[in-house]
Amino acid sequence: MSATRSAADHLPARLSLKSLREAAADCRGCDLYLHATQTVFGQGPRRAQVVMVGEMPGDQEDLQGRPFVGPAGRLLDDAIAAAGLARQDVYVTNAVKHFRWTPRGKRRLHKTPSARHVEACKPWLQAEMLVVEPRIVVCLGATAAQTLIGKQFRITQQRGEFLVTAWAQWTLATHHPSAVLRAPQHEDRARMRRELIDDLRLVAQKLPDFAAKKNSKEPAAPARPQRTAAPARPSR
Ligand code: URA
Ligand code: SF4
C-alpha cells in the first residue's frame, strides 16, 4: 500500500481487461464508491485502435454499469457514426470510474470529480491503455485531456490537434458530448456538435482501414491539409 490511497492498491498482478474489470469492481481507491451504484469500467475490444476517454459515468451509466449509455452517450454514438467510425470498434472509458453526484430533489446531479479523485483513479486508465495499446486516444473534454495530455490543456484552444503523448501514437482532444448538450445557445450546440464530428473524422482518417476503404471507392481523393504537424513516433 502506498501512503496515498488510490486505485493502485487494487490493481491485479496480471493485466487483462477481464482481470482489471473484476478488480475495479471492488475498488476503494477513493471515497466515490461509497455513494455510487457500481464501478463503470471501460468497454470495447481488447484490440481497439481507438480509445475514447470521458470524464466520469453519469446517472444512467451508474445504473447500467456501462460507459456512455445515457444522453451524452447517444450524442457520442451519433457523432462516431457520422465520422465514419463504429462504436463497437472503439474502446470507451472514463477518467474516473464511479459516479459523483449531489441530490437535487429526486434527481442525482453530476458533480465534477476533484483532482484528487482523478489522480486516485488514474491507475485504472493507465492499465487500460497498457492492455489495449491504442493507435489513437481521443480525450472527450477537459478532464480527460488534462489527465492524459497535461494540466495546461485548453479544449477551446487545442481541440482537434494531434499531439504526441506517452499513451499512443496520436492523442487528440475534442468537446465532451455533455458540453455539447449543455451549451445554452442553439447555435453553440450545433457548432460544437459539428466540431466534435469533424474531430472524430480526423481520427477516422488516420486509421489504415479507413484509408483503404476510401481508396477502393474513389480515385485519388485530394489530401486534406493537416491541422497540425506533430512528429510521428515510430509505429510499433
Ligand atoms: N459522461 C462521461 O464523461 N462519461 C460517461 O460515461 C457518461 C457521461
Ligand atoms: Fe476506485 Fe476510481 Fe472508484 Fe475511486 S472512483 S473508488 S479510484 S474506481
Image (tube, grey):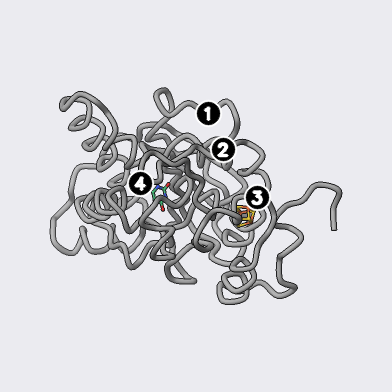
For image coordinates 56% across by 72% down, the residue present is 17
For image coordinates 40% across by 58% down, the residue present is 61
Q: Nearer the viewer, mark 2 or mark 3?
A: 3
Which quarter of the rendered picture does the C terminus lie within? bottom right
Distance of label 2 from label 3 (alpha carbons): 25 Å
* Residue 46 vs residue 41, the one in the foreground: 41
Q: Nearer the viewer, mark 1 or mark 3?
A: 3
Q: Which residue is mark 4?
A: 106
Q: Which residue is mark 3?
A: 31
Label count reads: 4
In the rendered structure, find residue 236 and report the number of the disc placed on it: none
Distance of label 4 from label 2 (alpha carbons): 37 Å
* Residue 100 vs residue 161, the one in the foreground: 100
Helix, strand or loop at disc 2?
Answer: loop
Q: Amino acid at mark 1?
A: Phe
| Residue 169 percent location from the top left of the image | 52, 50
Tags 1 and 3 in contact by the CB under 8 Å rule? no
Tags 4 and 1 in contact by the CB under 8 Å rule? no
Distance of label 2 from label 1 (alpha carbons): 7 Å
Tags 4 and 3 in contact by the CB under 8 Å rule? no
Tags 2 and 1 in contact by the CB under 8 Å rule? yes
In the rendered structure, find residue 149 and report the number of the disc placed on it: 2
Upstream in the sequence, badge 4 or badge 1? 4
Q: Amino acid at mark 4?
A: Lys
Q: Amino acid at mark 2?
A: Ile
